[in-house]
């Protein structure tokens, strides 16, 4: 993960087995001494810990080692801050960073001396520096939350306008660096940033495309990559972005099949989809990407295995191998997502009839003495929306 941060040179890595993490220092005295000698010998300026580090542990470790230290959440926030491009992305990262920083104030202020007295609105008699800083962060969080709410409302308006268009939405999801943006570019001809790095995509990108071979028109959505143990601050901040997946008629789960932990990554993605509230009824296709990174024997075995499984496609988004079957599967998926229903509306149900016409869902209409007999082609999601009118 450290390689994803520009300007960072990784000098080495070490696996430290901890029978029981030390509450104040994380590591024992012997390991700390060993790390300090290595840091001084290699002139290390930053230490990364791939796991949670409490504020007290972080403060004590930085003092003992004499260098800056970041835990897993801190590193992810640094990467996200470097990647954020849109106004929404920047706001989300700022909110997540402030929420994280709020818990770390003990790093800067250990003495808890009284800062000042004064009236209640100034801070109150005996307010400590930590309390003052925490209050300042809370005020900034409120401001950011208001700004983000405006952006979220705009996104909801866009989502509502797309709902009026009778094009199914296909969402690409998957673990970070699984190749979603490369696949998105291959399908759309777009030039979304696609690099071999974590979190290359932070802001969802959507394109209206006509599937090759005379297939239907769809809206294709590229989403932020998932990761195991996603910090709670980031889950909360990026929920509005991740919720684009909830509007999808078809989910394409992209996996890096060449990664040694591909099964664990897939399980993490499914867990996050469940936590978002993605319904089991939403059709899904699993894409085993990066078969070009496998040796010939392994690649043939993966392709053969995928061919025996329903809703699984093996391909390389880089070379284009296996793309045609995927396009056929997407076409079948969005076609299966729609079905024909005959309904009857009374003359007093003009609002419902207008709703159907706005979305171009009516295939045939016959007027009767009591109202209208309609033949409607829609998705299960559209039918559920109609039934709530």
Image (cartoon, rainbow, N blue to C red):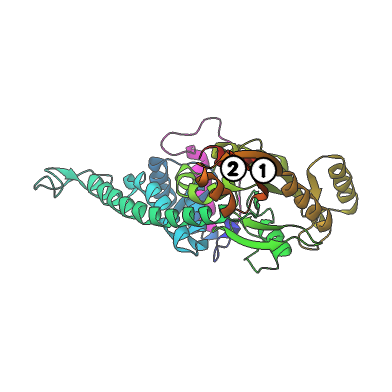
Magenta run includes residue 28? yes
- Say left or right for 136 vs 295: left
Vertical placement of residue 200 versus 72, above or below: below
Mark 2 is surrounded, within 10 Å at the Cα level, by few (under 14), some (14 to 19) or many (20 or more) other residues, namely some
Q: Earlier in the sequence, mark 1 or mark 2?
A: 2
x then y, percent, for residue 30: 51, 39
- Say left or right for 299 vs 145: right
Residues under labels 1 and 2: Cα distance? 7 Å
Secondary structure under tag 1 reads: helix
Taking depth in this image into account, of 386 and 181 the one nearest to the observer is: 386
Taking depth in this image into account, of 22 and 225 the one nearest to the observer is: 225
Report the disc number at residue 265. 1
x then y, percent, for residue 169: 64, 52
x then y, percent, for residue 192: 63, 66
Magenta run includes residue 77? no
Taking the view exactly as shown, the residue that stands out farthest to the front is: 369
Which stretch is magenta? 12-41
Is the residue under label 2 in contact with that under label 1 (CB below 8 Å)?
yes
Vertical placement of residue 321 versus 22, above or below: below
User: How many labels sit on residues?
Assistant: 2
Report the disc number at residue 150. none
Secondary structure under tag 2 reads: loop
x then y, percent, for residue 292: 82, 57
The structure residue drawn at horizontal position 25% and vertical position 47%, both measured from the top left corner, is: 135
Mark 1 is surrounded, within 10 Å at the Cα level, by few (under 14), some (14 to 19) or many (20 or more) other residues, namely many
- Say left or right for 97 vs 43: left
Q: Which residue is mark 2?
A: 228
């Amino acid at each position: 993960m450290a390689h994803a941060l520009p300007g960072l040179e990784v000098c080495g890595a070490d696996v430290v087995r901890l029978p029981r993490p030390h509450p104040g220092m994380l590591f024992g005295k012997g390991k700390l001494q060993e790390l300090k000698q290595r840091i001084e010998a290699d002139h290390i300026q930053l230490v990364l810990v791939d796991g949670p580090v409490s504020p007290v542990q972080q403060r004590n470790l930085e003092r003992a080692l004499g260098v800056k230290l970041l835990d897993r959440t801190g590193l992810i926030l640094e990467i996200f801050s470097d990647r954020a491009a849109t106004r929404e992305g920047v706001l989300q990262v700022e909110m997540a960073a402030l929420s994280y920083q709020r818990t770390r104030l003990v790093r800067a202020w250990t003495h808890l001396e009284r800062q000042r007295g004064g009236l209640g609105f100034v801070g109150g008699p005996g307010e400590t520096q930590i309390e003052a800083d925490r209050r300042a962060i809370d005020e900034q969080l409120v401001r950011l939350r208001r700004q983000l709410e405006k952006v979220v409302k705009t996104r909801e308006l866009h989502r509502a306008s797309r709902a009026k268009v009778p094009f199914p939405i296909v969402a690409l999801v998957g673990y970070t660096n699984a190749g979603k943006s490369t696949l998105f570019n291959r399908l759309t001809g777009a030039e979304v940033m696609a690099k071999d790095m974590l979190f290359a995509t932070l802001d969802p990108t959507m394109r209206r495309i006509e599937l090759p071979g005379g297939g239907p028109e769809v809206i294709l959505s590229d989403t932020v990559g998932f990761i195991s143990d996603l910090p709670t601050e980031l889950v909360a901040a990026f929920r509005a972005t991740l919720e684009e997946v909830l509007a999808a008629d078809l989910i394409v789960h992209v996996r890096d099949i060449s990664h040694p932990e591909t099964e664990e990554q897939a399980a993490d993605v499914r867990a996050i989809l469940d936590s978002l509230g993605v319904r089991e009824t939403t059709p899904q296709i699993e894409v085993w990407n990066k078969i070009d990174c496998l040796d010939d024997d392994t690649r043939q075995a993966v392709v053969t295995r995928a061919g025996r499984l329903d809703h699984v496609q093996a391909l390389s988004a880089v070379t284009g191998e296996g793309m045609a079957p995927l396009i056929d599967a997407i076409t079948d998926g969005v076609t299966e997502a729609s079905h024909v229903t005959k309904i009857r509306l009374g003359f007093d149900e003009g609002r419902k009839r207008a709703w159907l016409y706005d979305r171009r869902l009516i295939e045939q209409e016959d007027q009767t003495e009591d109202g209208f007999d309609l033949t409607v082609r829609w998705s299960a999601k559209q039918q559920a929306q109609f039934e709530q009118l």
